[in-house]
Amino acid sequence: MRRGIYHQDHEAFRALVRDFVTKEVVGEYPKWEKAGQMPRDVFGRLGELGVLGMAIPEAYGGAGQEDFRYNVILQEEASRALVTLSTVRTQLDVILPYFLRYANAEQRDRWFPGLASGQLLTAIAMTEPGTGSDLAGVSTSAVRDGDHFVLNGAKTFITGGLLADLVIVVARTSTDPENRRAGLSLLVVEDGMEGFERGRVLDKMGCKVQDTVELSFTDVRVPVSNVLGEEGAAFGYLGHNLSQERMTVAAGSVAQARAALVATIEYVSERKAFGKPVAGFQNTKFELASVSTEVEAAQAMLDQAVLALVDGELSGADAARVKLFCTEMQARAVDRCLQLFGGYGYMMEYPIARLYTDARVARIYAGTSEVMRTIVAKSLGL
């Protein structure tokens, strides 16, 4: 279906990204998968192209374009090439908005040039072994000691934590028995601070290029000047960016489902069974017609939500609806596509197998499908 959300500048950016992915990523991607991470120099090259600094003000080496459509294009072009740039996606879509919104002038001078150039890599540490989605239950503590906070605790499932130079840590700086959400702050821990350690690199079933690690903090002295925003206000900050985080996941889900559809059409057109192409069987035609219809429905829903996000009008409930629909659609679509590959679909040498394993986490991170349903239900007065 015709899409009308992009303009000439967006398409020029798409051409830039497509060229980069084709020349710099596709051939190297298998090595990255085996290594379990993207090489650090990839971020530097993306910084040189201006990709990492699109939303950063021009005064710090960026382009000053806080337009989420550029972020969506980055995902679409990676998926089109059957690769992912998930750690880049996390830095741009999930973490950078916190710096853009809450960093003060001194912090901007200190960090923004490196963020734009790709010399400073980031992670955000919210989840703890015992908290999951219950951010009000964070137990990592930060106690004020003069001009520093003394940070203690542990975090898990931290994307990009292996190479991160700056880690935004959600920590409890005060306790209010009447309000569990009060007293949380965002502290920026810098690589090399004594007591900050990276633990295991977690072995995931999918998203192999996206390093995911455990982090620990033992009496880490974090300067008060590294607090993002107001002390004790972090819970509200975390909620502010949730709609964009959920659009990020939804955009990836639609792009990857479309990539699965294209790959499957190519495969069934070449693969023969019982003397004719698999594409010639009615079941194949009906299955792919159904997948195509679902992809287009999700794309239309996503595009309207992206425009609403760009205009600052996307509600939390609508973001939940879009994430729920798009990620559940992705699961159905990729599963049906893999089935048409037969036994080859189960082999990791075929991209459809990776698309299948990568897809599973989309219904978990940035809020599970169950949480999305709860949010939607509340918006209905239920």
Image: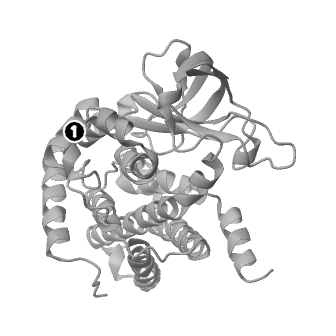
Query: Is the residue 362 above or below the residue 140 in the image?
Result: below
For image coordinates 24% across by 77% down, the residue present is: 6
For image coordinates 51% across by 71% down, the residue present is: 326
Query: Is the residue 293 above or below the residue 94 in the image?
Result: below
Label 1 residue SS = helix
Left or right placement of residue 363 versus residue 274 in this view = right
Q: Would you say residue 271 is visible in this rendering?
A: no
Residue 280 position by quadrant: bottom left
For image coordinates 70% across by 63% down, the residue present is: 371
Question: Foreground residue, 26 or 67?
Answer: 67
Question: Foreground residue, 109 or 216?
Answer: 109
In x, y percent, where is residue 27?
19, 42
Question: Which residue lies under the disc numbered 1?
Answer: 117
Residue 184 position by quadrant: top right
Query: Is the residue 20 above or below the residue 127 in the image?
Result: below
Coloring scheme of the render? one colour
Question: Which quadrant is home to the N terminus?
Answer: bottom left
The three-letter amino acid code for the residue at tag 1 is Ser
In x, y percent, where is residue 303?
39, 78
* Residue lying farthest to the right in this orientation: 177
Question: Which quadrant is home to the C terminus?
Answer: bottom right
In x, y percent, where is residue 271?
31, 66
Check disc 1: other Cα within 10 Å, few if <14, some if 14-19, many if 20+: many
Q: Would you say residue 5 is visible in this rendering?
A: yes
Number of residue marks? 1
Question: Foreground residue, 56 or 206?
Answer: 56
For image coordinates 60% across by 21% down, the residue present is: 217
